[in-house]
């Protein structure tokens, strides 16, 4: 399959090719239909094409490794993409999550211009996959901008929603600022190493450590903004509150998966076990995110803002796994990423089932009015809180095991304290849903079929994987090994990421 492709496309992962070609075809079809006598778009048609493209990209990701020979190596610097097992895992989570969000939004993105909504969703998915698989700084930045610009359009897509335009403007300003900071960091890294590989320049033992450290900190700052990790998190609650529910789910799930996969790849060759500056910064941000995110969500009366704080806290938990180099670190991060994606997507799907009730007070008595939705949301919140038998319990236990093996006692203490805080507001939502509803409470409407199927599937998967975590543990073990430079494991990781790539060019600054 890959042998029939031009050399410039042979190393591009199959999901990227499928989505890029499909987006162009869909864009052409929309333009032709709009220029015809009918003029109006077909929501069902665009949604069907988007679902078919996501399914085709998922199948291409699953079978490309079986049917295609290894891609040829790039001629200079580094390959654009690292089509390894870590990328395949992250891209698979992105595609499955995007498919779930499409099921939520099939009828929510209503209107005669609904075609553009599905087109933006596909563009965001494409950008997320490029970000997750980039081994080159230029490819990473291009993918990041595709993701950011598509999110901007999706946030402001329904301007009649309260605060939609305000949320879009906040995202525009902060996304532009963080992109500029990140780009400056990438430029400094290239000036120091003469290399466009997407990896921390400190791993190359630079002659000017101060410049390499500055570049790493600037890239980290930009990534932390995009990840909404504390203390760069203040925009997330406002944006999720103003965005439509499917778009909020996309920001909280798909973009976070892509950026964390990229962050782990960025530090693949860096020693994060010692007291070096990047490890210290990551540890501080992890503690601030865990504690600050849960404190932000504590006492919230808006469920979208509550899930925003929860998302910030879970980024901190993932950073603990990233910092816990050892036999469980990489596997625990990958496992937790899947558990977080399923539970958070399910929680937003439950909100989408009752879209006109974002306030916690309006969910009073939901176990009596909509027992299935309330039960599904309770399962998702139990997973996010780490309550057995939901998968989140094993995911947090896995991270604790990784932290214990790496002697990350301070981080584990913060994890336990913040988890107790989170337990309070997660259980409070269940308590409110069990409280008898007032007589004047408005009856909840019917749930759309796509949301119903998605909720049931995610609730079942959350419970089954929690009861039988073995297959996913086997799948995630050994996907990615962040290691110290110069060691045997680091050499193995280097071979996986940049097999056959030529040595770095001479540095531009002396």
Image (cartoon, helix red, strand yellow):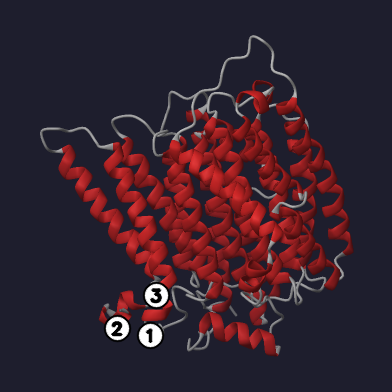
For disc 2, the neighbor class at 10 Å (few under 14, some 14 to 19, many from 20) is few
On the image, the x and y values in percent for residue 401 come to: 81, 67
On the image, the x and y values in percent for residue 135 come to: 50, 73
Question: Could you tell me which quadrant the N terminus lies in?
Answer: bottom left
Decide which of 142, 82 is in the foreground and name it: 82
Which residue does the numbered mark 2 point to in the structure image?
3
The answer to whether residue 221 is visible is no
Q: Secondary structure at mark 1?
A: loop
Q: How many numbered discs sit on the rendered protein? A: 3
Which residue does the numbered mark 1 point to in the structure image?
69
The residue most toward the top is 440
Left or right? Give the position of 423 relative to 91.
right
Give the mark nearest the N terminus, 1 or 3: 3
On the image, the x and y values in percent for residue 123 come to: 38, 52
Instruction: Please determine whether, in this image, residue 149 is positioned above or below residue 4.
Output: above
Q: Secondary structure at mark 3?
A: helix
Q: Which of the 4 quarters of the picture holds residue 68?
A: bottom left
Which residue does the numbered mark 3 point to in the structure image?
64
Q: Which of the 4 quarters of the picture holds residue 198?
A: bottom right
């Amino acid at each position: 399959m890959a042998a029939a492709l031009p050399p410039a496309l042979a190393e591009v992962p199959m999901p990227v090719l499928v989505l890029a070609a499909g987006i162009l075809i869909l864009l052409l079809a929309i333009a032709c239909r709009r220029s015809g006598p009918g003029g109006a778009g077909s929501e069902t048609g665009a949604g069907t094409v988007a679902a078919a493209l996501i399914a085709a990209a998922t199948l291409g990701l699953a079978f490309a490794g079986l049917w295609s020979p290894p891609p040829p190596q790039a001629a200079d610097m580094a390959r654009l993409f690292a089509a390894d097992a870590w990328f395949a895992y992250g891209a698979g989570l992105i595609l499955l999550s995007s498919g779930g969000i499409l099921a939520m939004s099939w009828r929510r993105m209503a209107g005669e211009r609904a075609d553009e909504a599905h087109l933006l969703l596909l563009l965001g998915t494409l950008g997320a996959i490029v970000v997750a698989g980039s081994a080159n700084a230029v490819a990473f930045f291009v993918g990041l901008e595709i993701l950011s610009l598509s999110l901007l359009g999706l946030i402001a897509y329904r301007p009649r929603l309260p605060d939609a335009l305000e949320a879009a403007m906040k995202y525009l300003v902060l996304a532009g600022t963080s992109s500029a900071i990140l780009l400056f960091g990438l430029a400094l890294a290239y000036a120091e190493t003469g290399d466009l590989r997407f990896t921390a320049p400190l791993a190359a033992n630079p002659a000017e450590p101060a410049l390499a450290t500055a570049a790493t900190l600037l890239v980290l700052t930009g990534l932390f903004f995009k990840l909404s990790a504390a203390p760069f998190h203040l925009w997330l609650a406002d944006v999720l509150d103003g965005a439509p529910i499917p778009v909020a789910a996309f920001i909280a799930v798909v973009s976070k998966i892509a950026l964390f996969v990229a962050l782990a790849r960025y530090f693949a060759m860096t020693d994060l076990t010692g007291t070096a500056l990047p490890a210290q910064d990551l540890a501080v941000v992890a503690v601030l995110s865990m504690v600050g995110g849960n404190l932000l969500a504590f006492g919230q009366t808006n469920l979208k803002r509550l899930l925003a704080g929860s998302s910030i806290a879970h980024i901190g938990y993932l950073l603990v796994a990233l910092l816990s180099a050892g036999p469980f670190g990489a596997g625990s991060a990958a496992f937790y990423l899947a558990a977080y994606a399923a539970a958070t997507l399910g929680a937003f799907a439950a909100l989408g089932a009752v879209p006109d009730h974002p306030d916690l007070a309006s969910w009073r008595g939901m176990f009596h009015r909509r027992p299935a939705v309330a039960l599904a949301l309770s399962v998702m919140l139990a997973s996010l809180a780490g309550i057995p038998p939901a998968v989140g319990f094993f995911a947090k236990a896995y991270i604790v095991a990784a932290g214990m093996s790496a002697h990350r006692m301070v981080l584990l203490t913060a994890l336990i304290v913040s988890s107790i805080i989170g337990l309070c507001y997660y259980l409070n939502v269940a308590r409110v849903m069990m409280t008898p509803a007032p007589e004047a409470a408005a009856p909840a409407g019917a749930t759309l079929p796509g949301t119903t199927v998605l909720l049931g599937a995610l609730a079942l998967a959350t419970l089954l994987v929690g009861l039988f975590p073995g297959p996913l543990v086997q799948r995630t073990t050994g996907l990615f090994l962040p290691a110290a430079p110069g060691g045997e494991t680091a050499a193995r990781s280097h071979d996986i990421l940049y097999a056959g790539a030529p040595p770095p060019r001479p540095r531009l600054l002396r």
